[in-house]
Amino acid sequence: MRITIIGSGYVGLVTGACFAEFGFKVTSVDNDKNKIESLKGGQIPIYEPGLESLVRYGQTTGRLSFTTDLKTSVIEADVVMIAVGTPARRGDGFADLSYVFKATEEIAESLNGYTVVVTKSTVPVGTCRKVAEIIEQKRPDLKRGVHFDVASNPEFLREGSAISDFMRPDRVVVGTDSNAAKEVLAKLYRPLYLIETPIVFTSIETSELIKYASNGFLAMKIAFINQMADLCEKAGADVQDLARGIGLDGRIGRKFLNAGPGYGGSCFPKDTLALSKTAHDLGAPVTLIDAVVSSNDARKKAMAKKVLDDII
Ligand SMILES: NC(=O)c1ccc[n+]([C@@H]2O[C@H](COP(=O)([O-])OP(=O)(O)OC[C@H]3O[C@@H](n4cnc5c(N)ncnc54)[C@H](O)[C@@H]3O)[C@@H](O)[C@H]2O)c1
């Protein structure tokens, strides 16, 4: 089975290198020529433990290759994964889907033979169906369910432990309404069956929401412990002991209970905003997430002010 991954950024690169390690033939595509040239020369543009050697090994075995030629790589593929960026849109904080839709149009032009088009990027609920619509509009000769199918397969890897997160994940989530696509995705993740990884098959919409619900929940834990830290300070209590005291309860868990300056990074801020916006748009506001977003913003502002005050 041949896999083509559109986008050789953090997620695309890790996913490609790991699927090549599973034994599949993977083509990693990017429209950034410099990035592809560096990758061909064995230079990895990001630091991630274990990634460089995995990429080199994939290249040596001939199972992993890099190209800017999206057309040829899509023609040859059985599975095309979209792993382009989905940054926060200016103004309203919703996910900017322009890269996903642009990539979809390019993919549509070259689809050939039954192909499963998979969204690996973090995309709001409804996006995967929109991807199918774009393909149908662009290629009226192609019939969904016959010539192509779509599936949602969000990624949960963490920067710093991305390879082991991919190779030994807590779970894999796949959303599709097609049995053929389900079979293809099950084949892709077969190596993980051997280590008894739960593969959660759901509807497309559920899969898309699982990704946002996961990040929203983790962000909520961070916002919670930060508010508890403020309360501890006023009450003369120790937030680290408190975190240990509650985290040892298996229902709560110890992770994501480190009080600090508020969450940041490339995913939580944009994903919480996008979840909040989606929920409002659909008329089912998740007000807990709205509160998390404003509490985190307030925390970051207060922390920045404290740093400035300390300097002055
Ligand atoms: N970074 C993470 O830890 C992480 C974890 C889980 C999920 N995600 C999600 O995965 C997605 C990708 O994130 P990332 O951090 O890998 O992004 P990134 O910005 O590092 O990489 C995206 C790549 O896609 C390329 N690209 C864009 N449009 C293209 C096109 N039409 N054709 C070919 N290449 C194209 C860009 O040049 C870039 O190299 C996002 O939706 C993100 O939210 C990220």
Image (cartoon, helix red, strand yellow):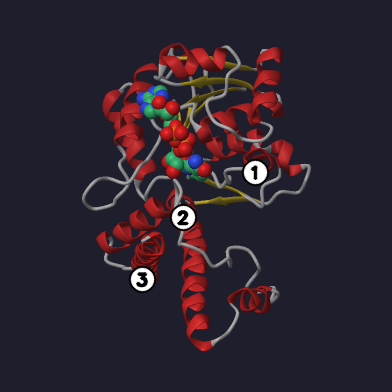
Q: In the rendered image, which quarter contains the N terminus?
A: top right
Question: Looking at the image, which is closer to me, 254 or 23?
Answer: 254
In which image quadrant can residue 103 be found? top left
Q: Which amino acid does label 1 sit on?
A: Ser
Q: Mark 3 points at which residue?
A: 291
Q: At numbered mark 1, what does the secondary structure look like: helix, strand or loop?
A: loop
Instruction: Give the image location of residue 250, x and y in percent.
Output: 69, 73
Q: Which label was assigned to residue 61?
A: none
First-in-chain label (3 vs 1): 1
- At 34% across and 54% down in the image, what residue appears? 274
Residue receiving disc 1: 161
Of 195 and 272, the residue lying toward us: 272
Q: Which image quarter has ligand 1?
A: top left
* In-front residue for pair 181/66: 66
Is 309 situated left or right of 201 in this image?
A: left
Residue 173 in sight here: yes
Element type where label 3 sits in the image: helix
Which residue reaches farthest front? 312
Instruction: Say which residue appears at 46% left-offset and 62% top-offset.
Output: 261
Q: Are marks 2 and 3 in contact (CB under 8 Å)?
A: no
Residue 232: x, y in percent? 53, 82
Sequence-wise, the earlier of marks 2 and 3 is 2
- Between the C-alphas of marks 1 and 2, the distance is 26 Å
The residue wearing badge 2 is 206
Q: In this view, does 220 lie to the left or right of 96?
A: right
Q: How far apart are marks 2 and 3 (CA)?
A: 23 Å
- Element type at marker 2? helix
Nearest to viewer (mark 1 / mark 2): 1
For the residue marked with disc 3, what is the amino acid? Answer: Ala
